[in-house]
Image (tube, rainbow, N blue to C red):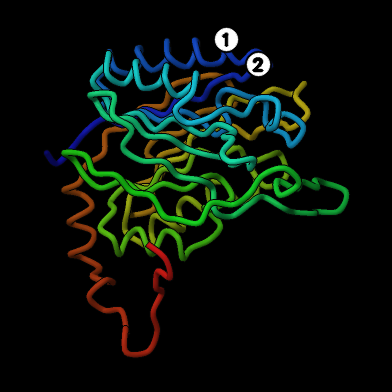
Amino acid sequence: MTSFRLALIQLQISSIKSDNVTRACSFIREAATQGAKIVSLPECFNSPYGTKYFPEYAEKIPGESTQKLCEVAKECSIYLIGGSIPEEDAGKLYNTCAVFGPDGTLLAKYRKIHLFDIDVPGKITFQESKTLSPGDSFSTFDTPYCRVGLGICYDMRFAELAQIYAQRGCQLLVYPGAFNLTTGPAHWELLQRSRAVDNQVYVATASPARDDKASYVAWGHSTVVNPWGEVLAKAGTEEAIVYSDIDLKKLAEIRQQIPVFRQKRSDLYAVEMKKP
């Protein structure tokens, strides 16, 4: 299978967890009826984004939100990347993505490894580490189409993560993410295109829809980029589903035309995984 349809759900997030989950599931069903085989939700899809909200909305995995994702993935027979939710485990909180297969099996669980701690004077200061702990492992999963690597938002800034995933055979990287009105216009698309071209992979990002009244205003613009660095599909700021047909033959052609993987000087440098 050299092509498949990917869908990104740019969900409007409210303060009512059950509504967020119910509406996410209805969008997932809609995407499946349009032929999507892999569907991704945005970062923090069941909760407003903010350090004050994470402890209140956190749950176990499996838990109520991920149980609904498990059920809808099975109902629709799709691969479902569950954006992320605040996860509680052994007294710690994580920003966690759960992935479910077409039979409802939990295929992967990825905890954001780079926490979003930034200070841009006069623009934005944010410190995820006030309440969240970082994950410490990579996460990939296999589909009949290709292997998929997972990151969350700020992880996209770290080229090494994407390089490791490419080394491990991933052809699609998915980053549920909520950039903001400072970093969004500056870096959101640039980083996606950079990771795609660097590693000759497809890159997809799923953002929450923009809510100007929220304490943290997401940039929106969920995007799919091909290995040539071209933007294949991009949402605006409103709630939407973004579709893109992923062509793995195109990826193979690009890797043949510009064979950077064969040309790397492993005698001079290396990016290596310290921990599986």
Residue 267: image quadrant is bottom left
Q: Please identify the residue farthest to the left as the structure is shown.
A: 1
Q: Is residue 25 above or below residue 38?
A: above
In front of the other: 114 or 146: 114
Closer to us: 259 or 68: 68
Q: How many marks?
A: 2
What's the CA distance linking mark 2 and mark 1? 7 Å
Verify CB contact (< 8 Å) between mark 2 and mark 1: yes
Q: Residue furthest bottom?
A: 267
Residue at 82% across / 46% down in the picture? 123
Work out which quarter of the rendered image holds the N terminus and state it: top left
Query: Disc 1 designates what residue?
Result: 19
Q: Amino acid at mark 1?
A: Asp
Within the image, what quadrant is residue 18 found in?
top right
Q: Is disc 2 placed on a helix, strand or loop?
A: loop
Q: Choose top left, top right, bottom left or bottom right for residue 79.
A: top left
Residue 41 vs residue 135, the one in the foreground? 135
Name the residue beneath numbered marker 2: 14
CA neighbours of label 2 inside 10 A, class few (<14), some (14 to 19), many (20+): some
Q: Is residue 268 above or below residue 33?
A: below
User: Percent position (x, y) of residue 44?
Assistant: 58, 31
Coordinates of residue 271 in the picture (x, y in percent):
41, 74
Residue at the (88%, 48%) spot, across then down: 122
- Say what secondary structure mark 1 lies in: helix
Q: Quadrant of the C terminus?
A: bottom left
